[in-house]
Amino acid sequence: MNSNTHTTTDLASKRIREALVARIGEALADERLDRQNRGDVYLSSNSEIDFARQVSSMECARLSASRRQEGLPAFTESEEQALISRAIDQVLGMGLLQKTLDDPQISDIHVRGNSPIWVKLRNGLRECRPPIVDNDDELIDLIRRTATRMGRSERRFDAGSPELNLQLADGSRLFATMEVSSRPSLVIRKHQFEISSLEDLVVRGMMPHGIAEMFRAMVRSRRNVIIAGGTGSGKTTLLRALINEVPPEERIVTIEDAYELGLERFEHLHPDHDSLQSRPANIEGQGEITLADLTKMALRMDPDRVIVGEVRGAEALPMLMAMSQGNNGSMCTLHADSTRSVFPKLAAYMSMSSTSLPIETTNLLIASSVHFVVHIEVVRGQRRVSSIREVVDSDGSTIMSNEVVRNVNGNVGFGYPLREETRELFEENGFREEMLR
């Protein structure tokens, strides 16, 4: 087959796919309108895909009959399935990106306009893949379509709102920019919700069994824990595993920018929970709900534990206040390069609130609120717990703490012993320091 034949075939396939896309869109719009008029519930995501597949099959049969009348060959079964899959991905998925999104070996996807995309594999390697759009405008259209389908509230993506942050149907986190970046850009971080226990993390080499038992005792002893680390180090994964150690009779309220913890996926473990998500301002610049706002709301929802997905601003103050007011066992994540650097970061975040506190008061609040700080790092593609620090007290401008666990070059080192009070508490909950030897 020469190049001209290839081009003709490609154009014909594109026209047919565009016809399928239009038909699916029309049918879905009519179905949603009919359900709204009847007062019926909307179709679930999976039901919409099944509905779109039925519509596509009928449309393909009609197009095949039309082609035969014109003396053209009908679609083969494989051609028909490929056309249907591409069309459904374009309407209900993410177009050519959907295949990459569905790949379980990929953890992160980076898209910049119509340039080749980059993916990060779960083993730490990076690969370059073909472009998913023909031009930059197509990428913007793809992002807008996705925001319309996936957003739980109004989601703009234009010069006036040049960033977009939302959760996809599979739990992946999407972040996109335009105007403020040289070209429209899209980043997707895929979460492994199936990795949901401390045992899973032991098997994957993040920690030895003894440290997992120590974490279990922290949760059972209702210690307040901050998990720190860099981007992609596994902070959310560890936080999720710790949350899943919380007894099912306790009430949990989570606070996030985008739903990543996925408590609804573990309903049997957390039957009494509420998940709160921040909200950007609307077109008129009103209606913004910040993480700090949500943290204050959470305290009115009778929580046993408050979980903040990521602290990075003024929400630090109400979170620490919650920890120090009887909501022991609360947890959060924070970007930091060591356990020690968590303390000045918390102080800086607290200074962003409307209440200005002296550094001595700030440190006193931190010391009375936080019991343990954990740091995770990635070394040669392997995530691992690198440090666990127990907070002891504050002395003016200094937070006093002991590094009780340190991981150097893959070797777990044990520093200061736990405080006597903590050791006794942990022993009551099944942990003994000998487990770390």
Image (cartoon, grey):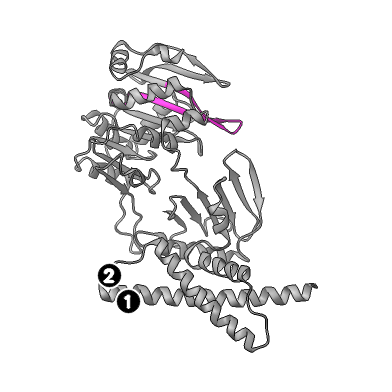
Q: According to the image, label 1 marks what residue?
A: 34
Considering only vertical position in the picture, is 260 above or below 203? below
Q: Give residue 206's mark.
A: none
Examine the structure image and report whether residue 372 is included in the region drawn in magenta.
yes
- Which of the two residues, 378 or 185, is positioned nearer the viewer here? 378
Q: Amino acid at mark 1?
A: Asp
Secondary element at image label 1: helix
- Which of the two residues, 255 or 219, is positioned nearer the viewer here? 219
Q: Is residue 108 left or right of residue 153?
A: right
**Tag 2 near tag 1, CB within 8 Å:** yes
Examine the structure image and report whether residue 346 is included in the region drawn in magenta.
no
Quadrant of the snapshot with the N terminus: bottom right
Give percent across and percent down for residue 246: 30, 32
Q: Is residue 359 visible?
A: no
Q: Quadrant of residue 340?
A: top left
Q: Which residues are magenta?
A: 369-388
Q: Is residue 270 visible?
A: yes
Q: According to the image, label 2 marks what residue?
A: 40
Q: Residue at 33% x, 33% y: name it.
A: 331
Mark 2 vs mark 1, CA separation in Å: 8 Å
Considering only vertical position in the picture, is 342 above or below 80? above
Q: Is residue 410 left or right of residue 70?
A: left
* Residue with the most extreme bottom position: 69
Give percent across and percent down for residue 303: 22, 38
Main SS of residues in magenta: strand
